[in-house]
Image: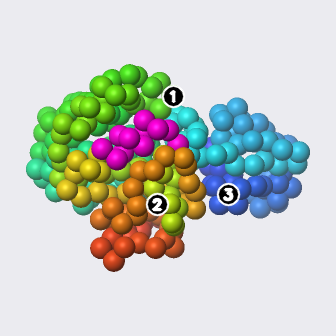
Amino acid sequence: MFTHERQQHIVALLTDRGRVSVADLASSLAVSDDTIRRDLNALAALGLVQKTHGGALSLDVPNMRRSARAAVLPEVKQALGRRVAAQIEPGLTLMLDAGNSLLAVAQALPDVPLTVITHSLDIAQLLSERAQVKLILLGGEWDASQRLFRGSTMLAMAQRYRADLAIMGACAIHATLGVTASDESDGAIKRAFITGSKRAWLVSDHSKFDEHAPYAVAPLAAFERVFTDRDPQLPLAPTTTLTLLTETPHG
């Protein structure tokens, strides 16, 4: 196993378990304790883990910087993006939330006529060369840590538009509290996207399950479909379709 693959495996274990030890990792990965310590040092420098005496703890994924969250389950995010994009029909107007899972959706969108409304600069840059995409970028105050535009100006712009479908990410997903956001502005734009669209889909890897953040976004019943990599055992509404990955991500 290469260094990058081993470190991704460690991050995935931490996402599931919350805590790992050097000894257990060294044994399961058939490498030395020193190799695992170097891996944990590298991951801690990237802001992905919190080192402890003899091991590491997972960090609070909902509150990570977006650049750090990109390293959490990247193969799963790419696979989810392909799964969602395969369901997109020509001619739709989409509201695309910001985030790494949504960037993966944008990367996989079919080359068909679409209108895309987003506040994500990364998504806008990605789609800016697509001749068949009518791109609407919602501007406002730039948030460098989250790679998006925010604030009252951006929110007012978003509320002027209507879409066929909002494709949403999540900071946290909870059985009773629904989808929540760690930032007040993010919660407001997510609510505006859902309110302004005929339908809403939710895209999330399992690291967001059984978590909650301070700002309400929507109950689970607000989403027509939920795309994820594991059965979250959530009390979904009868009108909500759970779509699990049918491919096994590499790594």
212 over 240 or under it: above or below = above
> At 65% from the left edge and 34% from the top edge, which residue is drawn?
46
- Amino acid type for the residue under numbered disc 3: Leu
Q: Which mark is residue 74?
A: none
Label 2 vs label 3, nearer the camera: 2
Residue type (three-letter) at the residue carrying disc 2 = Gly
Q: Main secondary structure of the magenta part?
A: helix
Locate residue 116 relative to residue 232 in the image: left or right.
Answer: left
Tell me the tag on residue 13.
3
Q: CA distance from mark 3 to mark 1?
A: 26 Å
Amino acid on which disc 1 is placed: Ser
**Residue 7 x/y as whole percent:** 67, 46
Look at mark 1 in the image and give the residue it sits on: 145
Secondary structure of the residue carrying tag 3 is helix
Name the residue carrying label 2.
178
* 155, 55: nearer the viewer: 155
As displayed, is residue 52 above or below residue 228? above
Residue 224 visible in this rendered orientation of the protein: yes
In the image, which residues are magenta? 182-192
Q: Residue at x 38, y 29 (%)?
A: 150
Where residue 9 appears, x then y in whole percent?
65, 54
Which class describes the residues within 10 Å of circle 3: few (<14), some (14-19), or many (20+)? some
> What residue is at 65 percent from the left and 41 percent from the top?
48
Along the viewing direction, whichever of 180 and 109 lies nearer the viewer: 180
Q: Residue furthest right?
A: 53
